[in-house]
Image (cartoon, rainbow, N blue to C red):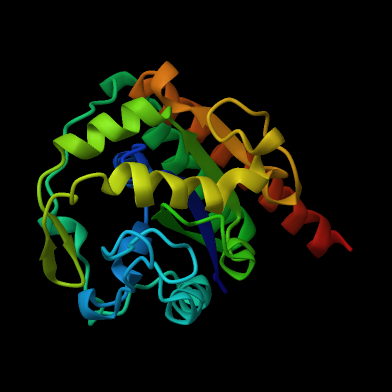
C-alpha cells in the first residue's frame, strides 16, 4: 500500500520580491507538484476597504487583504491529497511576468535528484510524495496558515528595488478583474507601510530591510537576500533545503516503522 505525503513549501516576501518566479522554477523541478497563489484569495474589488486617511482602497492591510478563513481551509484541504479543486479560479496565468532564467545544469541536476529520491520513497518506503508550493505576500502573518507549511522560505528585497519593480508592473488581475497601476503615492502611503506592519515582528528592531530574523515566526525559516543572489543561486539553495527536509521525513518514517 502506498501512502500519500503532501509537503507544503511556503514562499513569502513583499510584493514584487520574486515569490511567484521562484515558485514556478521549483514547480518545474519538483515532480508531482502544484502551486497555490495567495493572491487568488484576495477579496472582491468592491469589498476592499478604503483607507480612512488617504481615501483609496487598501489592498495591503494584513487583516483584510486576504480572505483568511477561505485560505486556511483551502490549505487544509490541499494538505490532505495535494489536489487543487477543478473549480478553483487562478489569476496568475493572466499576469505577465519578467523572465529570470535558471542555469539549465542546476535545474537538470535537482530535477534528476528529486525524481530518484521520490522513486526510492515510493519503492522503499511506500510513500508517494506530492509537493504544494504556496506563494504569498502575507504568507507569514497568519499563524494558522503558517502551521500548515512544512518549509518556510522568505525572500527579502530592499524597498527601493521593490518600489521600482512595482512601478514597472502593468495591470494586475485580482478576483478575475483588472486592477490598474497604483494610484499616486499608493506605495509610500499604503503598500510599503502595510508590508512593514505585517513583518516587523520577524526582524530585530522592526527593521524589515536589514534586521536579523528574530522571534517564533522565523524559527526554521530560510531567509534569503534575494537581490544579492542570482536566480540560480536562490533555486539551488532552496532545493538543498527541500532535499534535507525530505531526507529527514523519510528517516522519521523508518524510525516509526522500526518502533
The count of marks equals 0
Give x and y (percent) for residue 156: 48, 33
Q: Is residue 63 left or right of residue 180?
A: right
Image quarter of the C terminus: bottom right
Give x and y (percent) for residue 106: 36, 23
Q: Is residue 25 left or right of residue 61?
A: left
Q: Is residue 40 left or right of residue 155?
A: left
Occupied quadrant, residue 236: top left
Give x and y (percent) for residue 86: 24, 79
In the depicted view, which residue is nearer to us: 180 or 130? 180
**In the rendered image, the vertical position of residue 50 relative to residue 16, given as above or below:** below
Q: Residue at x 26, y 44 (%)?
A: 185
Q: Residue at x 41, y 54 (%)?
A: 136
Q: Residue at x 31, y 44 (%)?
A: 187
Residue situated furthest front in the rendering: 53
Answer whether residue 120 is visible to the viewer in this image. Answer: no
Image quarter of the N terminus: bottom right
**In the rendered image, the vertical position of residue 169 relative to residue 74, given as above or below:** above
Q: Is residue 169 left or right of residue 12?
A: left
Give x and y (percent) for residue 182: 19, 50
Residue situated furthest right in the rendering: 259
In the depicted view, which residue is nearer to us: 147 or 177? 177
In the depicted view, which residue is nearer to us: 229 or 188? 188
Q: Residue at x 43, y 69 (%)?
A: 82
Answer whether residue 104 is visible to the viewer in this image. Answer: yes
Amino acid at each position: 500500500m502506498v501512502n500519500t505525503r503532501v509537503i507544503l513549501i511556503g514562499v513569502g516576501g513583499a510584493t514584487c520580491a520574486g515569490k511567484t518566479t521562484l515558485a514556478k522554477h521549483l514547480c518545474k523541478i519538483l515532480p508531482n507538484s502544484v502551486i497555490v497563489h495567495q493572491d487568488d484569495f484576495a477579496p472582491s474589488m468592491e469589498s476592499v476597504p478604503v483607507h480612512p486617511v488617504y481615501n483609496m482602497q487598501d489592498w495591503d492591510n494584513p487583516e483584510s487583504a486576504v480572505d483568511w478563513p477561505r485560505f486556511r481551509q483551502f490549505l487544509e484541504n490541499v494538505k490532505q491529497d495535494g489536489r487543487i479543486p477543478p473549480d478553483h479560479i487562478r489569476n496568475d496565468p493572466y499576469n505577465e511576468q519578467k523572465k529570470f532564467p535558471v542555469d539549465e545544469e542546476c535545474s537538470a541536476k535537482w530535477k534528476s535528484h528529486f525524481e530518484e529520491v521520490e522513486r526510492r520513497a515510493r519503492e522503499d518506503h511506500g510513500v508517494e510524495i506530492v509537493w504544494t508550493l504556496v506563494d504569498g505576500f502575507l504568507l507569514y502573518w497568519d499563524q494558522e496558515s503558517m502551521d500548515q507549511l512544512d518549509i518556510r522560505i522568505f525572500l527579502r528585497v530592499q524597498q527601493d528595488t521593490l518600489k521600482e519593480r512595482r512601478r514597472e508592473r502593468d495591470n494586475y488581475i485580482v478576483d478575475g478583474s483588472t486592477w490598474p497601476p497604483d494610484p499616486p503615492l499608493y506605495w509610500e502611503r499604503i503598500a510599503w507601510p502595510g508590508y512593514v506592519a505585517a513583518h516587523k515582528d520577524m526582524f530585530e528592531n522592526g527593521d524589515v530591510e536589514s534586521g536579523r530574523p528574530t522571534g517564533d515566526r522565523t524559527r526554521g525559516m530560510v531567509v534569503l537576500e534575494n537581490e544579492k543572489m542570482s536566480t540560480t543561486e536562490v533555486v539551488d539553495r532552496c532545493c538543498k533545503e527541500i532535499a534535507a527536509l525530505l531526507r529527514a521525513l523519510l528517516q522519521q518514517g523508518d524510525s516509526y516503522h522500526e518502533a
